[in-house]
């Protein structure tokens, strides 16, 4: 059972999971389900989420960082050089600010993000200091809308990374090549002998598309963009309606 966080288990940017969602996830584990958090957040961004749930594994940074809560340690971390991507985006998007993940600590940032944009400790640095191997690069285009960002990058080629744009903020995330929630889950389930046909995935964003396609049952949240809903097997009610709980209660009745 692969679960996105923001827009699926919580309101975007929140650490508050409703009692209904917590109860539904716990009930599912009683049916033998393994709970895998699958999020674009960095590892430091899930420290208040994971303890609230019976989590078997957390796949963070869109698949680039794996964390085992039982061991309390990172079991996989894939990195890339963010320098060329930052240079391309700076030229295309004047006023954009950038941050690279320091796994388990926070971020190095080039420019100032909005309050509460970044998890953990943020240290402002120069471009040269920012261009170090990282698992996750994020960019906010200040004073712009999600629609403006989507239009500006619609024909953009960013070689050497996998990237996606957010549908609620003018925000772009880049991770190493050939890394996504879907590829991470496929490798994880292969190692556990679990077939994708037996997997359930719930998400709401563009970075969930590969995961929803991969799973035997992919569920898009009710507020997800049309292109995400279009590839899902089912569309749940919205996060404000505890849509994930409604789906889980139906699939794993008490």
Image: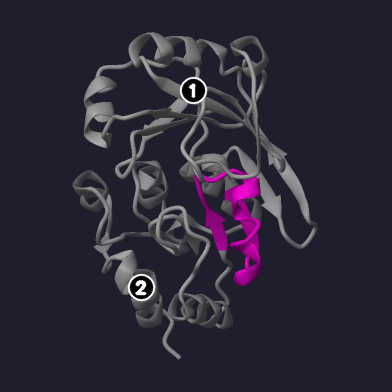
Of marks 2 and 1, the one in the foreground: 2
Q: Is residue 245 visible?
A: yes
Q: Residue at x 61, y 71 (%)?
A: 52
Q: What quarter of the picture does the C terminus occupy?
A: bottom left
> Looking at the picture, does residue 147 appear above or below residue 72?
above
User: As rendered, which of 142 and 188 lies closer to the eye?
Assistant: 142
Residue 132 horizontal/vertical position (percent): 67, 18
Q: Position of residue 39 (x, y in %)?
A: 51, 49
Is residue 43 within the magenta segment?
A: yes
**Nearer to us in this view, 116 or 149:** 116
> Where is residue 115 drawn, in percent x and y?
50, 42
The residue tagged 2 is 242
Dot 2 crowding, Cα within 10 Å, few <14, some 14–19, many 20+: many
| Label 2 secondary element | loop
In reply to whether residue 66 is colored magenta, the answer given is no
Above or below — where is 26 with respect to 64?
A: below
The disc, 2 or 1, on the residue closer to the chain's N-terminal end is 1
Can you give x and y, in whole percent of width and height, for residue 112 in the image? 51, 28
Count of residue discs: 2
Residue, disc 1 = 161
160 w.r.t. 250: above or below? above
Disc marking residue 57: none
Q: Look at the picture and state if 134 lies above or below 16.
A: above
Question: Magenta residues, as a range?
Answer: 36-59
């Amino acid at each position: 059972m692969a679960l996105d966080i923001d827009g699926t288990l919580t309101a975007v940017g929140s650490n508050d999971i409703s009692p209904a969602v917590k109860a539904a996830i716990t009930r599912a584990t009683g049916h033998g389900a393994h709970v895998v958090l699958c999020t674009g957040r960095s590892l430091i961004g899930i420290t208040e989420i994971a303890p609230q749930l019976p989590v078997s594994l957390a796949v963070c940074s869109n698949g680039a960082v794996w964390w085992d809560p039982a061991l309390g340690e990172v079991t996989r971390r894939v990195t890339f050089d963010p320098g060329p991507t930052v240079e391309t985006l700076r030229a295309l998007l004047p006023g954009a600010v950038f941050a690279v993940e320091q796994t388990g600590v926070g971020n190095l940032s080039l420019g100032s993000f909005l309050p509460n944009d970044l998890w953990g400790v943020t240290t402002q640095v120069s471009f040269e200091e920012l261009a170090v191997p990282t698992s996750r690069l994020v960019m906010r285009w200040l004073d712009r809308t999600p629609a403006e960002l989507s239009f500006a990058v619609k024909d953009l080629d960013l070689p050497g990374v996998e990237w996606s744009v957010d549908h609620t903020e003018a925000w772009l995330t880049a991770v190493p090549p050939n890394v996504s929630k879907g590829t991470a889950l496929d490798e994880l389930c292969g190692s556990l002998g679990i077939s994708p046909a037996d997997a359930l995935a719930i998400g709401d964003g563009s970075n969930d598309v590969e995961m929803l396609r991969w799973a035997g049952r992919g569920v898009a949240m009710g507020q997800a963009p049309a292109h995400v809903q279009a590839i899902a097997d089912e569309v749940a009610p919205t996060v404000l309606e505890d849509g994930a709980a409604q789906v889980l209660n139906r699939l794993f009745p008490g």
